[in-house]
Image (cartoon, helix red, strand yellow):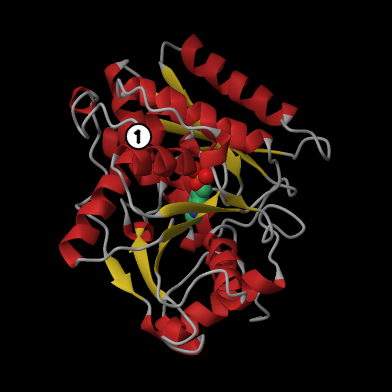
C-alpha cells in the first residue's frame, strides 16, 4: 500500500473555489436500526450528510466543483458548460457555482419531453439563471447521446465566437480534478471518525459516473481508512464504468504526486439495485425512501441515494453485515428530484 504522499502535501498547490461551509455532519440513524430489529440484528448506521454540502440544496457535486471551478477561473473562463439528465443535480450545482463565481452557465439537459415541467432541479436551474438547452435522448442502448454532443459543441462555438471563454465540464464533473473533492471528503470523514472514536467496517454510497467512487477509493487508500468502500450502482455499464473509476483514480493520484495504484479489484460496486435503469424507481428504492423518512426523517432522493440505501438495507437483511459492525452511509444529495416523484411514490 502506498502512502508516500501525506495528505495535503502536493494538493495544497491546487486551488479550490470555496463552495463548502465546513465539514458536513456525521450522525447516527437510530430509527432505521430499530426498524431492522435493533442491535441484535442490525449494525450501527451513521450517515455522512453530503446532501448538506454546498449551496442551493447541496450534494456531492459541490466537493468536485470546488476544484473544477477554481481551474475554470485560473484559465480565465467566462462560462461553465455542462450536461446531464433533465433532473441532474450536477447541472443544478454547476448553475449555483457559476452564480457564486460570477460566471455564465449553459446546461445541456436530456429529456424525453421537448418542454419538461420546470420542477425539482430544472426549476432551480432556471432560478439560478442558467441557460438551459433541452435535447432528446440518443438512440436506445447507445453509450453517448449525439444530440447532447452536438448541443455542447454548438454552445462552445457560439460563446467563443462572441469572445467569451467557455469551460466544458464532463457529466457529473467526473474528471481528475473533481475526484480530488472526494479524496478530501475521506480525510474529513476520517477526522470525524477519529474524534468520535468510531471505527466503521464499510462505507456505502451511490455510484453513477464514478468520480465520487474514484475519490473515495483513492482517498481510503491514501488516508489508510479502516473501512471498505461499497459503491452501489444506480445505472448499468460495468465493467466499463469500473475501468473509468480506475482511470480517474490514477489521474487524480498523479495530480497529487502520489504513486498509489488503484486496480479494478479495489473498486467494489454492487449491481443488484439498478432495476430497469437510471432514474427508474424500483420496489426496493421506494421502500428505502419510505423507511428512512418514517424512521429517521431522513430524505433520500429517488435516483441515487434511494438505490444506494436499498443496497445497504439488502445487505443488512441478507446477513452480509455483522450486527456488531458500524456502517457509514454517504448521503450524496439529490433531494430536489424528490419533488418530481409524487407519482412514483403513489402520493398523488
Ligand atoms: C451525481 C450523484 C451521485 C453519483 O456521483 P458520481 O460521481 O457521478 O458517481 C450520487 N448521488 C447524487 C445525489 C448525485 O447527484
Measuring from the top left, give residue 10's x and y in whole percent.
22, 23
Q: Nearer the viewer, residue 270 or 163?
A: 270
Can you name the residue that lies furthest to the right here? 140
Residue name at image x 49 percent, y 34 percent:
174
In the figure, is residue 40 to the left or right of 17?
A: right
Tell me, yes or no, if residue 82 can be seen here. Answer: yes
Label 1: state its secondary structure. Answer: helix
Can you name the residue that lies furthest to the left here? 195
Q: Quadrant of the N terminus?
A: top left
Q: Nearer the viewer, residue 41 or 182?
A: 41
Indicate whether 61 appears above or below 66. below
Measuring from the top left, give residue 120's x and y in whole percent.
53, 60
Indicate whether 342 appears above or below 268. below
Tell me, yes or no, if residue 103 can be seen here. Answer: no
Indicate whether 208 appears above or below 66. below
Would you identify the image quadrant in which residue 50 lies? bottom left
Q: Which residue is mark 1?
A: 180
How many numbered tags mark residues here? 1
Would you identify the image quadrant in which residue 201 lies? bottom left
Ligand 1 neighbours mark 1 (CB distance < 8 Å):
no
CA neighbours of label 1 inside 10 A, class few (<14), some (14 to 19), many (20+): many
Q: Quadrant of the C terminus?
A: bottom right
Residue name at image x 45 percent, y 25 percent:
250
Residue name at image x 54 percent, y 67 percent:
312
Measuring from the top left, give residue 338's x and y in whole percent.
54, 67
Measuring from the top left, give residue 181's x and y in whole percent.
34, 39
Residue name at image x 38 percent, y 59 percent:
51
Amino acid at each position: 500500500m502506498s502512502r508516500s504522499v501525506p495528505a495535503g502535501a502536493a494538493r495544497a498547490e491546487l486551488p479550490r473555489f470555496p463552495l463548502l461551509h465546513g465539514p458536513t455532519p456525521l450522525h447516527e440513524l437510530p430509527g432505521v436500526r430499530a426498524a431492522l430489529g435493533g442491535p441484535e440484528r442490525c449494525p450501527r448506521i451513521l450517515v455522512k450528510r453530503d446532501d448538506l454540502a454546498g449551496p442551493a440544496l447541496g450534494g456531492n457535486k459541490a466537493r468536485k466543483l470546488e476544484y473544477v471551478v477554481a481551474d475554470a477561473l485560473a484559465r480565465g473562463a467566462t462560462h461553465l458548460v455542462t450536461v446531464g439528465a433533465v433532473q441532474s443535480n450536477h447541472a443544478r450545482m454547476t448553475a449555483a457555482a457559476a452564480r457564486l463565481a460570477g460566471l455564465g452557465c449553459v446546461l445541456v439537459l436530456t429529456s424525453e419531453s421537448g418542454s419538461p415541467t420546470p420542477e425539482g432541479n430544472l426549476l432551480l436551474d432556471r432560478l439560478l439563471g442558467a441557460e438551459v438547452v433541452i435535447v432528446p435522448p440518443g438512440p436506445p442502448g447507445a453509450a453517448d447521446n449525439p444530440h447532447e454532443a452536438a448541443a455542447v459543441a454548438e454552445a462552445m462555438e457560439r460563446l467563443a465566437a462572441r469572445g467569451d471563454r467557455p469551460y466544458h465540464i464532463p457529466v457529473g464533473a467526473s474528471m481528475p480534478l473533481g475526484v480530488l473533492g472526494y479524496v478530501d471528503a475521506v480525510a474529513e470523514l476520517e477526522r470525524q471518525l477519529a474524534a468520535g472514536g468510531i471505527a466503521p467496517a464499510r462505507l456505502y454510497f451511490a455510484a453513477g459516473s464514478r468520480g465520487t467512487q474514484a475519490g473515495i477509493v483513492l482517498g481510503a487508500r491514501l488516508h489508510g481508512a479502516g473501512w471498505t468502500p461499497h459503491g452501489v450502482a444506480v445505472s448499468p455499464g460495468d465493467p466499463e464504468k469500473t475501468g473509468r473509476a480506475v482511470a480517474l483514480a490514477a489521474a487524480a493520484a498523479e495530480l497529487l504526486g502520489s504513486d498509489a495504484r488503484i486496480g479494478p479489484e479495489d473498486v467494489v460496486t454492487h449491481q443488484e439495485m439498478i432495476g430497469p435503469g437510471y432514474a427508474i424507481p424500483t420496489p426496493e428504492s421506494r421502500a428505502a425512501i419510505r423507511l428512512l423518512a418514517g424512521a429517521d426523517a431522513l430524505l433520500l432522493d429517488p435516483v441515487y441515494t434511494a438505490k444506494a440505501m436499498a443496497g445497504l438495507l439488502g445487505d443488512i437483511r441478507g446477513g452480509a453485515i455483522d450486527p456488531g459492525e458500524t456502517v457509514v452511509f454517504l448521503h450524496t444529495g439529490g433531494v430536489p428530484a424528490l419533488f418530481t416523484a409524487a407519482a412514483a411514490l403513489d402520493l398523488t
